[in-house]
């Protein structure tokens, strides 16, 4: 399973455009993708700050999401100022029923899209998580 918290800052004055893109992304994701456990956007307290909680059954499902036509088809450069993807792991018994984040090896027969996604979005699982399972 793969769960992330995206920290997103958008360009001033693009709130309406950003929220329209996010509405379309969520609609398209749930209509066309399998294995999406959570995909939620939230406004932060700071101006132009948003968060996204994304959770997928595995990292391949996440990579397919990132490389999907509806994800690649938006002009994120027009609205995004910055984005930081933070991999997170649920606390046992307090993580909303989500399974642990894991990072299986890329198979030898992985597609070019999966190889590209692995390069762009490598999982970074801290060592200290292992002792907190």
Image (cartoon, rainbow, N blue to C red):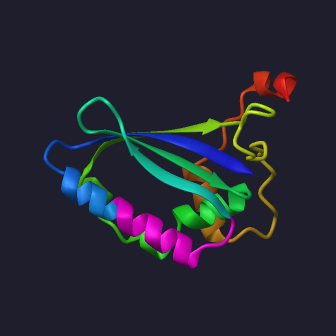
Count of marks overlaid on the render = 0
Residue at position x 73%, y 58% in the image: 57
Measured as percent of width and height from the top left, residue 118 is found at 64, 54
Prevailing SS of the magenta stretch: helix
Residue at position x 77%, y 46% in the image: 103
Measured as percent of width and height from the top left, residue 12 is found at 16, 42
Residue 107 lies left or right of residue 6; in this view the side is: right
The reply to whether the magenta stretch includes residue 50 is no
Q: Give the answer, above or below, for where 93 lies relative to 2.
A: above
Residue stretch in magenta: 22-35
Residue at position x 20%, y 56% in the image: 16
Would residue 74 be visible to someone looking at this image?
yes
Residue 58 lies left or right of residue 63; in this view the side is: right
Residue 70 lies left or right of residue 127; in this view the side is: left
Q: Give the answer, above or below, for where 23 lies relative to 92.
A: below
Which quarter shows the C terminus? top right
Q: Residue furthest bottom?
A: 32
Q: Quick one: 22 or 125, which is closer to the camera?
A: 22
Q: Give the answer, above or below, for where 104 lies relative to 34.
A: above
Residue 56 lies left or right of residue 106; in this view the side is: left
Would residue 115 be visible to someone looking at this image?
no
Q: Quick one: 109 or 92, which is closer to the camera?
A: 92
Measured as percent of width and height from the top left, residue 20 is found at 28, 63
Q: Dividing the picture into quarters, in which one does residue 64 lie?
A: bottom right
Q: Dividing the picture into quarters, in which one does residue 42 lie?
A: top left
């Amino acid at each position: 399973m793969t769960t992330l918290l995206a920290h997103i800052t958008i360009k001033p004055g693009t709130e309406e455009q950003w929220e329209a893109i996010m509405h379309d992304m969520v609609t398209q994701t749930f209509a066309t993708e399998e294995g999406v456990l959570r995909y939620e956007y939230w406004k932060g307290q700071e101006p132009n700050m948003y968060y996204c909680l994304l959770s997928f059954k595995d990292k391949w499902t996440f990579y397919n999401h990132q490389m999907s036509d509806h994800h690649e088809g938006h002009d994120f450069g027009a609205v995004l100022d910055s984005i930081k993807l933070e991999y997170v792991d649920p606390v046992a018994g307090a993580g909303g029923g989500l399974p642990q984040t894991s990072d299986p090896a890329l198979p030898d027969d992985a597609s070019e899209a999966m190889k590209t996604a692995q390069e762009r979005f490598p999982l970074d699982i801290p060592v200290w998580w292992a002792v907190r399972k």
